[in-house]
Image (cartoon, rainbow, N blue to C red):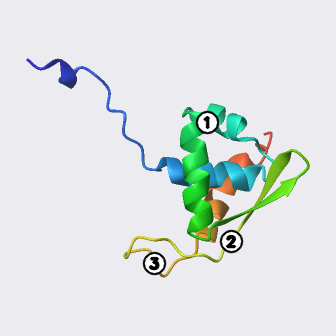
Amino acid sequence: MSTSVNRPSTWTFLTHHARVLLEIARDPQARVRDIAGSIGITDRAVQGIVSDLHQAGYVTIQRVGRRNEYSLNLEAHFRYRTEADLPVRLLIDMFAQHDLPKSGG
């Protein structure tokens, strides 16, 4: 019997690129270190992803003092052909609900 059968699968629906985009949407002044810690990847990986997102036009980076401040182009469209007609705003809006306070009751 294979030992891999007993291990839980580690795949997820969202890529690290999507997770970085969501973290920037939640906090446009977040440090690379904070994003990396939140997602569970290295600072270097986050830097590469932010660079990818910037080059593709999803993120604009502005230096403010010693920190970066990010802004998102929410009207940019997904890259994969089956979603290419949809803006990334849909992803951000869907996960923004996650950040809303839970209603008591």
- Report the amino acid beneath label 3: Ala
The answer to whether residue 19 is seen in the rendering is no
Residue 83: give its label.
none
Residue 84: give its label.
3
Q: Residue at 64% across / 35% down in the picture? A: 38
* Number of the front mark, 1 or 3: 1
Look at the numbered disc 1 and give the secondary structure of its residue: helix
Provide the residue designation for mark 2: 73
How far apart are labels 1 and 2 at the CA level?
23 Å
How far apart are labels 3 and 2 at the CA level?
15 Å
The C terminus appears in which quarter of the rendering? top right
Depth order, front residue of 36/47: 47
Query: Mark 1 vs mark 3: which is more N-terminal?
Result: 1
How far apart are labels 1 and 3 at the CA level?
29 Å
* Number of the front mark, 3 or 2: 2
Provide the residue designation for mark 1: 43
Q: Residue at 59% across / 43% down in the picture? A: 46
